[in-house]
Image: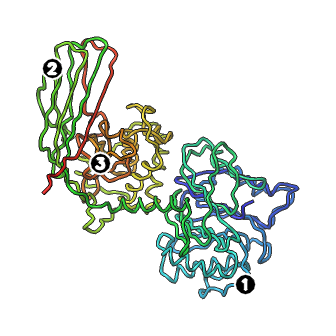
Amino acid sequence: MPNLLATSFEGTLAPSLDLRCLAPGNKLPDGWGLGYYPGSEPSAQVLKEHAPPPGGSIHSELVKAWGHLESPLFLLHIRNAKWGAISDANTQPFCRSYGGRDWMFGHSGSLRRALPPPPEIHLAPVGSTDSELVFCRLLSWVQAAGWQRLGEVDLERLRDWLEEINSFGPLTLFFTDGQDLCVYADAQSATGAWLWRVKPPYDRLALGDDDVEMDLTKRGAKGHKGVIICTDPIESRTGMKADWTPVPPGALVVVRQGAVRAEVLPPNVPRGAGQDAVAAELEARARLRRPNVAKSRVMDVHHRTVYRYNRAVERSTHILRMTPAQDRLQSVLSHELTMSAGTLREEYEDVFGNRVRRAHVETPYTELVIEARSRVELKDTDPLGSHTPHIRTTFPLLWMPWQQVMLQPFLQPPALPDTELEELLEYAMSFARRNDFDLLDTLLDLNFTLFKEYRYAQGVTTVHTTPFQVYAARHGVCQDFTNLFVCLARLLGVPARYTCGYIYTGPKHANTQQAEASHAWVQAYLPERGWKGFDPTNGVITQTDHVRLAVGRSYSDAAPTSGTIYVGGGMERLEALVRCEPVEEPSR
């Protein structure tokens, strides 16, 4: 039975908690408590029972079935008393208000000697346990440093401070301000902490042992990403494997909205395989915020599309968006467009600024070859302005009336059932909350998460696959990830448009298939920065590896080729091949 169990998930969960240790005939604990933050509010609610009755607990039945038990974060403590009387005041988790938020605290272990009381009288313990005294000392230390919430705390200093307290005896701590969940593992491994990073998709998620069981999906909760932490690993009750990894002794881990945001290890402690993976991901996320300044480059693109039919097509028209965009960040040095049949007619600029050619074919054909050869200079070397201070923009975004008119086509989410849009909105909001509602950090997190947690798989989706279906299945191709990013951004009030073009991946890229066809990514409009490209398939900001063709509300506005067959045709087979290669600079 774990002494401490905590969960942090993106979005709200309504778990069912079965405290089997309270059933008649079992050895009863010395109290238990469950804390959570209803509706993600800064105010916490704590349900406690310091002396469970031997005939069964009404309170435990409440946490098993109560529908109002909803929160992205839960903290459960089951007490085995060593210090202090068995009373409500000594039952964890403890809760105190500071900085406009409720803080909760749980301790596993028992100090061998008492701490001196905190200097602030208003942070004196109510009960008589060593655990509450540590909590009061911790809050006093945070207050003395001038920090208002855990997101502001210097984590290196916090880990060092906890290590000092750890010298008084076994100390594994879970504490939270409702946003961040911090876990410190005892430096001597007297009590440990184990972490499970839960990844969707899954239909049911439940875990437990003979004394406690938590079902996170029993009341219809959807598959969210999350982190579960406990002092003793417990088994999964479903087909989903419980992949527990130990928190290193003396380490501090910070979790927010279902994602590990930081990990601080003691000095001179080598990282294990699990810690290496966490560190690599955190480093990759940090690099995105300040991408390296790229060199401008020239790219040659050859795009060949072949349509084949089992019966001759006698008359058809075609819309071609195969001419690369021309603007201050991309210059078309040369371009040639040819067709094996028909006539290329008028060229015009559509309402989205795309360069479009219309073609008519009035002679029978069973094969139509469309080829575009372009040489393009790419100049988007510093998309986020790394040489200028970061302009911090936060949600909600406010637009002037004329901006709303111009951006309206890129603010409307796709037509989906309300229930699906509500779930996608909750998913989108988890990114905003995790990043303190900072616009750029939220979009970077979203971009990297889709790259990291969604599987690139060809042939499993179609052009009709909806953003919700991609979110539920967690797989797709560049078009699917782009559609999902666009949908989530628009639900947050961020103008986003579908972008079609080409990408140079290089010969050693793990996924060269995406370079052999047209590629899709997102452009989001950032105040005072303009349209910026995010490629969720590769988890990068677009720079000089991406060649833009066309933009629009969705794929249909930006598709390289489309058309209408008036007479003939039949079964169609499509073959598309793209070759995108940089032009080598002449040696000097």
- The answer to whether residue 198 is visible is yes
Task: Give me the residue at 24% from left, 47% from top.
Answer: 405
Q: Which residue, given by chain and number where applicable, does mark 2 sit on?
A: 342
The quarter of the picture where residue 106 lies is: bottom right
- The answer to whether residue 413 is visible is no
Q: CA distance from mark 2 to mark 1?
A: 90 Å
Q: Is residue 258 above or below residue 81?
A: above
Depth check, mark 1 against mark 3: the one in front is 1
Q: Is residue 184 above or below residue 445?
A: below
Tags 2 and 3 touching, CB below 8 Å? no
What is the number of the mark on residue 523?
Answer: 3
Q: Residue furthest front?
A: 588
- The first of marks 1 and 3 along the sequence is 1
Q: Secondary structure at mark 2?
A: loop
Tags 1 and 3 touching, CB below 8 Å? no
Q: Which residue, given by chain and number where applicable, does mark 1 sit on?
A: 113
The quarter of the picture where residue 167 lies is: bottom right
Task: Give me the residue at 29% from left, 11% from top.
Answer: 311
Q: Amino acid at mark 2?
A: Gly
Residue 370 coordinates in the image, percent (x, y): 21, 27
Residue 529 coordinates in the image, percent (x, y): 25, 58
Q: Nearer the viewer, residue 270 or 372?
A: 270
- The first of marks 2 and 3 along the sequence is 2
Residue 281 coordinates in the image, percent (x, y): 46, 58
Q: CA distance from mark 1 to mark 3?
A: 59 Å
Q: Amino acid at mark 3?
A: Gln
Residue 453 coordinates in the image, percent (x, y): 48, 48
- The first of marks 2 and 1 along the sequence is 1
The answer to whether residue 60 is left or right of residue 579 is: right
Depth check, mark 2 against mark 3: the one in front is 2
